[in-house]
Structure formats: C-alpha cells, structure tokens
Image: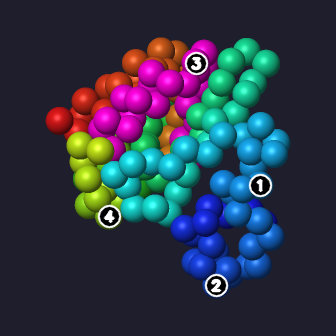
C-alpha cells in the first residue's frame, strides 16, 4: 500500500501503509505534484505514456458530463445536479468548501500545471469522464472558474 504522506495516518486506520507516495513513486517515473491552496491530503500524479503525459486526479477536479451520468449514474443523478457537481470540469462547490484553503493559490497552481506538463494528452479524474482533448486549456478553464 502506497499513500501520500499527509494521508498516511488516515489510511493506516484501515490498512498498513508500506511506502510514502512522494518517496516511492518517483522511482517508477511517476511525478507527484502537491497542489497549492488545497488541504494537504492528496496528490496529482503525472505519468509518462507512449504518446505523451497523463495527469491522474482524485477529488480536487470533477468532470461529470451528461454522457458520463447517463452511462454510469442512471439513477439519482438529480442529487449530483442539485449539488452543482455536473456539467463542467472543475472543483465542485463542496470541494471548494472542504478542500480549498487558498483559492488564488489553487488557481495559480492549476495554471502553472497547465503550463509545466509538456505534451499533456489525458487528464483522468476519479469522478467523471477522462479528458483527452486540449488538456492544458481545460486546466486553465478549471482555474478560471476560481476567479
């Protein structure tokens, strides 16, 4: 089991942690990005693919599109709509409330990530559809929602 350093105490309440992500994963070519302006509980992972780079995110950006909802959340999608978690790529209202500690720092971090990850081809999110087109621009759009 590998976990971010900040999440280790919480993960260990359920299962033993064998390694810290920030120390272990770079040995395998995985870059661990610590988001600025977000509570230190998760990382963004950068992976090299044969065709470019991928970013893997968990709770700090959602992409719950209508096709995704139709396919995977056929029941109770009205709750996600009511929560304002659908129809855009970005952090949700609940995410803003529970994760963001500094909105401007998070916005600037997203913009810097868009500029610094060369040949970004895909953004995979835990909640929603992966993004495979105009990835740097989509990160900038998510950042712009924080203005």
Q: CA distance from mark 4 to mark 3?
A: 30 Å
Contact between marks 4 and 2 (CB within 8 A): the answer is: no
Disc 2 target residue: 13
Q: CA distance from mark 3 to mark 2?
A: 37 Å
Give left or right: position of 116 versus 94: right
- Which percent across, then down, holds residue 88? 34, 33
- Which percent across, then down, holds residue 52? 68, 18
Q: Is residue 85 visible?
A: no
Say what secondary structure mark 3 lies in: loop
Q: Quadrant of residue 106?
A: top left
* Front residue of this view, candidates 137 and 5: 5
Give left or right: position of 57 versus 87: right
For image coordinates 73% across by 28% down, the residue present is: 48
Query: Which marked residue is nearer to the observer: mark 3 or mark 2?
Result: 3
Please tell me whether residue 124 belongs to the stretch shown in magenta: yes
Please tell me which of labels 4 and 2 falls first in the chain. Answer: 2
For image coordinates 67% across by 80% down, the residue present is: 12
Label 1 packing within 10 angstroms: few (<14), some (14-19), many (20+): some
Q: CA distance from mark 4 to mark 1?
A: 28 Å
Disc 4 target residue: 98
* Furthest-bottom residue in this view: 13
Number of numbered discs on residues: 4
Contact between marks 4 and 1 (CB within 8 A): the answer is: no
22 is higher (above) or lower (below) than 2: above
Give left or right: position of 5 versus 81: right
Disc 1 target residue: 24
* Front residue of this view, candidates 6 and 64: 6
Q: Quadrant of residue 71?
A: top right
Tell me the magenta residue range: 106-126
Disc 3 target residue: 118
119 is higher (above) or lower (below) than 11: above
């Amino acid at each position: 089991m590998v976990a971010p350093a900040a999440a280790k105490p919480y993960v260990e309440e359920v299962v033993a942690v064998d390694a810290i992500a920030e120390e272990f994963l770079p040995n395998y070519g995985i870059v661990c990005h610590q988001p600025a302006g977000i509570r230190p509980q998760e990382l963004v992972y950068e992976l090299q693919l044969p065709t470019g780079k991928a970013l893997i995110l968990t709770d700090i950006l959602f992409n719950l599109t209508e096709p995704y909802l139709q396919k995977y959340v056929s029941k109770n999608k009205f709750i996600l709509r009511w929560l304002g978690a659908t129809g855009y790529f970005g952090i949700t209202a609940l995410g803003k409330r529970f994760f963001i500690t500094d909105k401007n720092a998070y916005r600037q971090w997203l913009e810097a990530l868009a500029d610094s990850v060369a040949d970004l081809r895909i953004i995979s999110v835990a909640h929603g559809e992966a993004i495979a087109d105009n990835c740097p621009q989509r990160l900038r759009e998510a950042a712009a929602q924080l203005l």
